[in-house]
Image: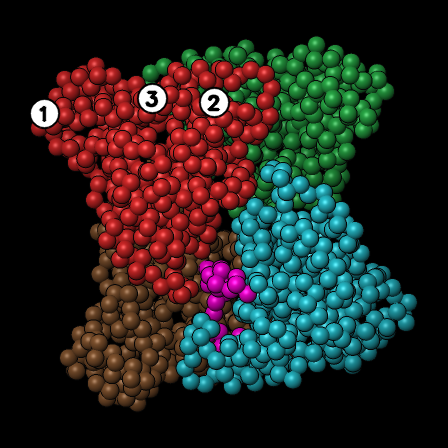
Chain colours: A brown, B cyan, C red, D green
Amino acid sequence: MNFASDTASPCHPKVLEHVAAANAGPAPSYGGDRWTAQAEADLSEMFETPLRASFVSSGTASNALALALLCPPTGGIVCHAAAHINCDERGAVEFFTHGAKLHPLDGAHGQISVPILQAYLQSVDESFVHAIPPKALSISNLSEAGTHYSPKQIATLSTLAKEFGLGVHMDGARLANALAFSKTRPADISWASGVDILSFGFGKTGAMAAETVLLFGDKMDLLPQLEARRKRAGHMLPKQRFVAAQIIAMLENQLWLETATHANDMAATLAEGLQNSGIAILHPVEGNEVFSALSPEQISKFRGGGATFYAWPDGSARFVTSWNTTKAEIDAVLALL
Amino acid sequence: MNFASDTASPCHPKVLEHVAAANAGPAPSYGGDRWTAQAEADLSEMFETPLRASFVSSGTASNALALALLCPPTGGIVCHAAAHINCDERGAVEFFTHGAKLHPLDGAHGQISVPILQAYLQSVDESFVHAIPPKALSISNLSEAGTHYSPKQIATLSTLAKEFGLGVHMDGARLANALAFSKTRPADISWASGVDILSFGFGKTGAMAAETVLLFGDKMDLLPQLEARRKRAGHMLPKQRFVAAQIIAMLENQLWLETATHANDMAATLAEGLQNSGIAILHPVEGNEVFSALSPEQISKFRGGGATFYAWPDGSARFVTSWNTTKAEIDAVLALL
Amino acid sequence: MNFASDTASPCHPKVLEHVAAANAGPAPSYGGDRWTAQAEADLSEMFETPLRASFVSSGTASNALALALLCPPTGGIVCHAAAHINCDERGAVEFFTHGAKLHPLDGAHGQISVPILQAYLQSVDESFVHAIPPKALSISNLSEAGTHYSPKQIATLSTLAKEFGLGVHMDGARLANALAFSKTRPADISWASGVDILSFGFGKTGAMAAETVLLFGDKMDLLPQLEARRKRAGHMLPKQRFVAAQIIAMLENQLWLETATHANDMAATLAEGLQNSGIAILHPVEGNEVFSALSPEQISKFRGGGATFYAWPDGSARFVTSWNTTKAEIDAVLALL
Amino acid sequence: MNFASDTASPCHPKVLEHVAAANAGPAPSYGGDRWTAQAEADLSEMFETPLRASFVSSGTASNALALALLCPPTGGIVCHAAAHINCDERGAVEFFTHGAKLHPLDGAHGQISVPILQAYLQSVDESFVHAIPPKALSISNLSEAGTHYSPKQIATLSTLAKEFGLGVHMDGARLANALAFSKTRPADISWASGVDILSFGFGKTGAMAAETVLLFGDKMDLLPQLEARRKRAGHMLPKQRFVAAQIIAMLENQLWLETATHANDMAATLAEGLQNSGIAILHPVEGNEVFSALSPEQISKFRGGGATFYAWPDGSARFVTSWNTTKAEIDAVLALL
C-alpha cells in the first residue's frame, strides 16, 4: 500500500516495451537518433503547436534549466511559497541560474494568489538597482497542494506577469493529472494560456526517468542556449534514445492520460472513503493527491497496517495515488480505520 | 558498421533484464531502494574496499560532481590538454565547481607527462594570491588517445599530486576497457594507486545510462556534500532503482569485463587489419579505440561503404568498437579498402 | 538638510589627512604595505583579541565575502526579512556564495525573534537532502529598523545558532552607532558574544570607502580562503594603503566613536523634536536613524523645505543623521513643521 | 628605487586635491552625484563619442564585469596566454561570468598572433554543443609584455573576431601608456577600431583607486545589466563621488597623458641605459615597462642597491616606471651595475 509517492511506483509495462524495442542496432548519440525526433514530433502533436523539446532525467533538472532560460543571475523568480522549486530541490534553481532569487508568494491551496501577485509586481521599482527585479513566474500545475489551475487561472496569472515583463514557466511534474482532472486540451493549459516554457514530466505517470523542457512560441529560439546548458549540466544523455522511447510510449494512445485518470480516480475514491470515516480533506482533490487531517491514532493505524505516506509540512498526511494503485489497495487502507 | 562511438551501441540484453526485474512493486524513491544498496555493495566488492557510491546518468555529471568535491571555486584542476573534461563537456566542470580553472598539460598519447606535471607543480607559488593554485589532478583512463595508465603510472602521478596537496580524480568512462587490457584488479588501478574519487562509467560497456561517483578512503566523508550537490544538479533520480539495476547487471559475473574484453579484442583485430593494409596507427591500441592515419580516399571508401567514425582533433580517424561489434563487421570494414 | 543617508555625507577631514599622509613614496601593492599592517593591529587592539582583517570598499562586498566563508552553495543563511543582504544588495550574497539561499525570519523592530529562530532551527531535518539546511546566521547591528542588539541578545542568538551548527556573522555597517548607543566594548558585542565573522564598516561614520571583514577565533584560519575570494572578486585593491589609512584615521582616538556618538545624539534630538510635534516614532531610536509616521502633508512640508529622506518599505519616513549633521539642521528641519 | 609596479607608487597630488574638493556637503549616494556625471561626460569628450561609464575600484573588477557582459557562462573568451585575466586575477573572469572558459592563444611579445587567432576561430564548430564556442576577444593594451597595439592591429583583430560573432574587450589598465607611446587619439585605439567595451584604468597612472568600464556603440544598451552586476559584486560604492573625482582629476588637462608620457620616457631612458651596459631587452619598450635579461650577479647588484623589481614568468626581470619615477632614480639604478 504505497501512498508515499507516485515515483515510488514502478514504470508502466509499455514504457519498458518501447525501451526494449529501441534497443536494436546503433543509433547516433546525444539525441541525433530517430526516437528523439519522433518524441519531439509527438509532443508537438499533443500540444497542437510547433515546439522545441529537450529531454532530461529529473523534474528538478527540467525546472532549473527552464528557469535559467527565463531569468538572469541578477533577477528574481516568483513562485508559490510551497513550490517544489522553493522547498524541495536543494537550490537547483539557484544553481542553474547562477544565483537568481526566488520570491515566494502565498495563496490558498498551493496556488499563487492573483491579488498578492499583483500587489507584489506593482511594488517593484525596476530602476532601483539595489533590489532584485522579478523576471519569471513559475506556476506548479498540479500545485503542491494537489490542486489544478484552469486555463483561465493560468491566463490571468500569465497576462499579469507579462504586463510586468516576466516570462512564464510551468512546473508540470503532475500536469497529466491536472489535464485528466480538468479535461482540458494540453494546448489550453500551456502555451495558449501564456506559458512560455513548460517542464512536462512523465516520471510520475509511468516512465522510468523521462522529463521534458518544452519551448513554445518565440522561446523556441532559446533552444541552442538550452542545449548548451543541458550539456553543461550533464543532462544530455549519450544514449538518449532510451529517454525518447519512454516519451513515445507515454504519448502513444495517450497512455499518460489513461494512467493519470486512473490515479486521479483512485485519489477521489480514497478521499471519499476518508471523508466517510469523518476525516477532513484539507485541499480540493483535483489530481492524484489527498491531503488529510489525521489524528495520531489514525496515523498509527494506517502505518501499522502497512500504508506508506508522508507527514506534509502543512500538517496534513499526504496520500499519493499512482497509475498502479488498485481499488483493492484503497479498500484495504480504508479498512484499517 | 558503427565505429562512431561505444555510446551509439544499444545496451546489453542483461541490462534490460535487470531493469525489467526491478520493475515490480513499490520502492522508496531517491535511492532508498534495495537495488541501490546492492549496487553499492557490489561495487565495494569489485573494488575490494569500503566505498561510497552515487549514481548519475552521464559521465559528464560524474566527472563534474567528483571534481567539485576536490576543488574549490578559487582552485585549479590539472588534466591532459585533450581530456574530455577540457574539450567535450561544455564547461561542466567550470559549472559544477563554480568557476575553477582547468590547467591543461601536454603529454604523448593522451597521457599526462610526469616531468611536465612535476615542473608545473614546482612552479606554483601557493602564497601568490593572484594566481590559481592547483587543487586536483584528473586522470582519464583510458585516455582520450585510447591508451591506458598502469597502476604504477597512476601511483607515480598521484604521489606527485599529493605531495603538492592535490586530490586525485580518475575519469573512468572507459575504465573497464583499461582493466580488460591491463588485466589488473580494479583496486590496483584506483584507490590502491592513490585515486581519491573515481568516475566509473557503464554506459560505454553496456548500460543504458548508469554512471557512478565512487568515494574512497577518507573521501567517503564527502558523501553528504556529494548528495547535496547531486540533488541540486538534478541528478538524484526519483526512480533510482532503474539506474542501480543496470549497475547490478553490469557487475554480475563481471559482465563489464566480458563486454570490455570483447570490444578491446575487436579493436585489436581492426588495428591489425588496418596495419596490414599499410595504414598507420597513431596511438597504442590499449582499449577499444583505434586512431588511424587515413588518406582522403580511404576515408571516402570507408564512409561510402557505410562505416561511421569520427575525424578526431589530432588529425586521425577514430574507430571505436563496442560490446556488440562483430568480427563480421571488422571484416566488412577492412574489405572496403 | 541631508537625512537621506549617512553615506551621502562627506568623509571626515581626519580621514583625508591620513590618506594624504599615506601618499608618500612607494609602498608594496595589494596589502603588503605598513598601513595595512597597522590598521589590522589597531583593529585587534580595538577588539581586544587576535583577529585577521581584510579590507574592501563596500559593505555589500564585506557581507557577501563573510557569508561565503560560512555557508556552502548548498546551504542556507538565516537573516531578518528586512536585512540589507536580503533586500538591498542585488543578490550579492547569492553571487559570492554561488547560490546559497537566504532564509528570512520575522521579528519586531528589525530584530530576529528568538522563538521564531528556535522554531525554524528545530524544524530543520539535516538528513532530508532535498531541502536546504541553514549553515549561517547573519545579524544586522544596528538592524534595518535602527535598533541595536545588546551583547546578551547576540549571545542568545549565537548560542542557539551554534547549537544547530551554524556560523555567526554580523553585518556591522552601523556597528559604531550600536556601540555608541549601548556603551559596550567592541569585544562584547562581537566575538565574546559568539560572532565568528564581523563585517565592520567605516563608510557610514566618516570614511570615504573603507569596510572590513574581521575573522575571530578559529575562523582566523579562513584568511587564505578569504584572500583568494577577495582577489577573485576584484576587492583586493592595488593601492590598499589608502583604504588602510582611512581605517587608521577612524580608529585613532576612537574617531569612530566620536562621530557615531554625535550622529546618535542628532537622531535622538530629531526624534524628540518630531515627537514633540505629535509625530509617532515607529522604532526605538538606538542609533542614527529615526523612522517616523508622517502624513503626506508633513512629507510635503519637509521636502518642500529642502530636507532629503527616504520613504521606507515599512511605510515610515526614514531620517538618517550623520557625523556632520548639525544641531542647526535639526532645528531647521523641525521648524518646517 | 621602486620598479616593482606602477601601483606601488603614490597617487598624483592633483588626484588628492580633487578628492578633497569633492569632500564638501552632502551628495547623493551610489553615483547619483554631480562628480559622477561630470566624469562620464569628460570620458565621453576624451573618446569623442557617446558612451556609458561605470566606475570600480580595481582593474580586476573592470575586466571581469566587462567580459561578463560579452560572454555567457557557456561561452569562451579568447586572450593571450600571458594576459592578466588568464594569469593574475585569481579566476575573476570565471567568477563574474559564472564559469566561462578562457581560451589562451600564443603570440610574440605578449600580443595575440593574427594567424593563430584566425586558425582557432576557423576551427570552431558552433553546432558542436559539446565544445565551448568563443564569444569574446580580450586584448590587453599595453600587453603583458609592455608592447602596444596600434589602431590598425586592433582593427585587424576585432574585424576578425566580429566576423565570427565575438564581442571585443580591451584591458586598458595601461592604455594611457599605450596612447602616450603611439600618440594616437583615444577614439582610434578603442571604439573606432572595433572595441566594444573598454576597461580603462587610472590606478597605474596616478589615481588612488579609479577604474572604469566604458560601453561604446550598441553596447551602451548593456548599462542596466552592468549596473546590476556591479551592485551585486559590491563594486557600486556608496560614496562614489570620491572615485569620480579621481577620474576628473586624471582627465583634467590630460593629466593621464602627462603622467604616462613621463613614465614612458623614464622606461625608455632605463632601457637605453641597460642596453648600453650590454643587457638585452627582451620586448620592445613601448610603454612604461622594461623586460631585461639579467644575470644572477646583476640581479644581486640591483637588489643589493635597493632597487625593487619582479622576476617575470618569461624569465626576464621586469622594471616598471611610474609617473613619479625620477631621472635621478634611473641614474642611480644604472649606477649599480
Query: Which secondary structure type mostly characterizes the magenta part of the structure?
Result: helix
Measured along the vertical axis of the image, is residue D230 above or below residue D255? below
Residue C277: quadrant of the picture: top left
Whichever of callouts 1 and 3 sits on the residue coming sooner in the sequence is 3
Quadrant of the image containing the C terminus of chain A? bottom left
Chain letter of mark 2 equals: C
Labels 3, 2: front one: 2
In the rendered structure, which amino acid carries the disc numbered 3?
Ser
- Camera-side residue: C240 or C223? C223
- Quadrant containing the N terminus of chain A is bottom left
Q: Is residue D313 left or right of residue C222?
A: right
Q: Residue at x 81, y 73 (%)?
A: B268
Dot 3 corresponds to which residue?
A: C9
Question: Is residue D249 magenta-colored?
Answer: no
Picture coordinates of residue C206, whole percent (x, y): 36, 23
* Residue with the mark numbered 2: C245
Q: CA distance from mark 3 to mark 2?
A: 19 Å
Q: Which residue bears the numbered disc 1?
A: C277
Q: x%, y% of residue C136?
A: 39, 50
Distance between the alpha carbons at the discs numbered 1 and 2? 43 Å
Magenta stretch?
A: B220-243
- Inspect the image, locate mark 2, and give the three-letter code of the amino acid beneath it: Ala
The amino acid marked with disc number 1 is Ser
Picture residue at 51% right of the left edge, 12% below the top: D14
Q: Chain under label 3? A: C
Query: Mark 2 Cα within 10 Å, few/some/many (few <14, many 20+)?
Result: many
From where the camera sits, is residue A214 visible?
Answer: no
